Amino acid sequence: DTGVSQNPRHKITKRGQNVTFRCDPISEHNRLYWYRQTLGQGPEFLTYFQNEAQLEKSRLLSDRFSAERPKGSFSTLEIQRTEQGDSAMYLCASSFGRGVGDEQFFGPGTRLTVL
Amino acid sequence: GNSVTQMEGPVTLSEEAFLTINCTYTATGYPSLFWYVQYPGEGLQLLLKATKADDKGSNKGFEATYRKETTSFHLEKGSVQVSDSAVYFCALSNAGGTSYGKLTFGQGTILTVHP
């Protein structure tokens, strides 16, 4: 399967701990996005990479959140000092192109539960 | 800012009934419009899209027309099947500013189709 993969699929942690998620986009896709989805809501944009450059960050992304995409391949999203409000599904998507009408391919998500 | 509003859900229909899910948007510039679908236990996937006014997107019997005058992108299907049961998200990607193709989603509409 050559789709977008995310690991882990589920993560349970205690408040105050740090967590890191990984996203492997479709090979050759130059764009990579992170979204967060809470129950009963649509996904909300967190951050965007074009190749290895992080070009946009949402105001939702507090200082406790950091994302990287070394060498323009996989990406990691780290949350430091987790809070119960961080509990959500974290989605990664990738696309290829330069336009705004390009299809984004989504991974299965990482479900984070902060106790 | 950009926003997407979907009709309140959930929607419950009998097989072969006609489906309409309303979607309206607010955006600057000329957005591209999308419908994404999330089947039970699966990730988000693109159902259809339209990138300019009066365009009609279609796929798997679903259709939606980009109406700039009413800022709407309603999803329709003439005869639904049990297999169409899923959560449907309307989304836009803005052409203006530095949006880099990020998606703004509606809250989602749960569709359940009974035999």
Image (cartoon, coloured by chain):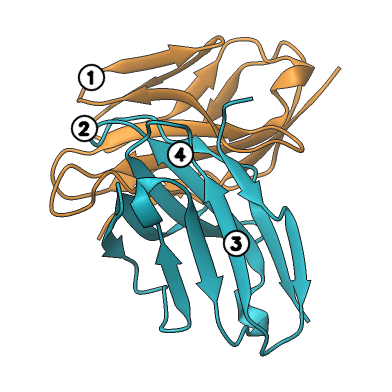
Chain colours: A cyan, B orange
Left or right of B96, for residue A22:
right
Q: Nearer the viewer, mark 1 or mark 4?
A: 4
Q: Is residue B54 visible?
A: yes
The residue where tag 1 is placed is B54
Estimate the x, y position of residue B31 in percent, counting from the top left. 23, 39
From mark 2 to mark 1, how far is it between C-alphas? 7 Å
Element carrying mark 1 = loop
**Lower position in the chain sequence, tag 2 or tag 4:** 2
Q: Amino acid at mark 4?
A: Cys
Estimate the x, y position of residue A115 in percent, counting from the top left. 78, 82
Q: Identify the mark at residue B90; answer none if there is no mark.
A: 4
Find out whether the residues at labels 1 and 4 contact each other: C-beta distance under 8 Å.
no
Q: Give me the residue at 47% from left, 49% from top.
A: A74
From mark 1 to mark 3, how far is it between C-alphas? 40 Å
The residue where tag 2 is placed is B68
**Lower position in the chain sequence, tag 2 or tag 1:** 1
Tag 3: Cα neighbours inside 10 Å, few (<14), some, or many (≥20)?
many
Establish whether labels 1 and 4 are both on one chain. yes
Establish whether labels 3 and 2 are both on one chain. no
Residue A85 drawn above or below residue A31: below
Find out whether the residues at labels 3 and 2 contact each other: C-beta distance under 8 Å.
no
Estimate the x, y position of residue B33 in percent, counting from the top left. 33, 33
